[in-house]
Image (cartoon, helix red, strand yellow):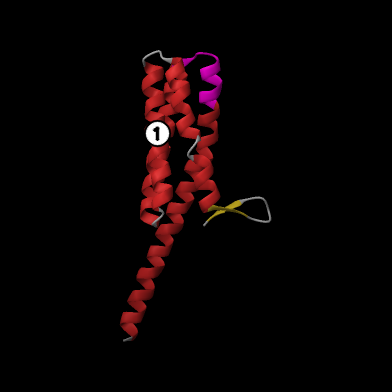
Amino acid sequence: MKKRALLLSLFLGVCALGLAQDEDAYKGLMKATPPAVGGIRKNLEAKALDAVVGDAKKLEHIFGESAEFWTKKGGSDAAGWSKDAQAAAAKVASAAAAGDAEGAAAAFKGVTGSCKGCHEAHREKLADGSYKIK
């Protein structure tokens, strides 16, 4: 019986460690998002569409990883928002690669539109000004 309890404790500890590592990786992805979003904004204004493609592809990757994270965590709403943002980022990249600045700008609204709902549902501001994943 003690052996089972020990094995169960070890298993749960490894699972918790894995989730903590996943959360750290996720936080890193989210911190990489504002520079890519800002880059797209700046480069859309400058009509620097090659740079828009690069940042949009970064966001496409970030939101793909985010969808995986939330799927594992059981946050189907957040996984859905992430998939929507990923698809919108792919549209931004495609439109910019085709030289369609207006299409890229229109698709970009779909990228940023997914952020607020997820942040409100799954992010908690702490007293020190940092955030915690709910």
Q: Is residue 84 above or below residue 40?
A: below
Amino acid found under the numbered disc labelled 1:
Glu
Q: Is residue 56 above or below residue 22?
A: above
Q: Give the residue at x 39% y 47%.
A: 79
Image spot of residue 84 (x, y percent): 39, 38
Image spot of residue 56 (x, y percent): 43, 27
Q: Which residue is mark 1?
A: 60
Image spot of residue 28 (x, y percent): 50, 44
Magenta segment boundaries in residue numbering: 39-49
Is 45 in the magenta? yes
- Please, what is the dominant secondary structure of the magenta stretch? helix
Q: Give the residue at x 42% y 22%.
A: 53
In depth, the one of 50 and 91 nearer the eye is: 91
Is 41 in the magenta? yes
- 89 vs 27, left or right, is left
Dividing the picture into quarters, in which one does residue 21 lie?
Answer: bottom left
Q: Give the residue at x 35% y 80%.
A: 5
Dividing the picture into quarters, in which one does residue 107 lie?
Answer: top left
Q: Give the residue at x 48% y 51%.
A: 24
In depth, the one of 19 and 107 nearer the eye is: 107
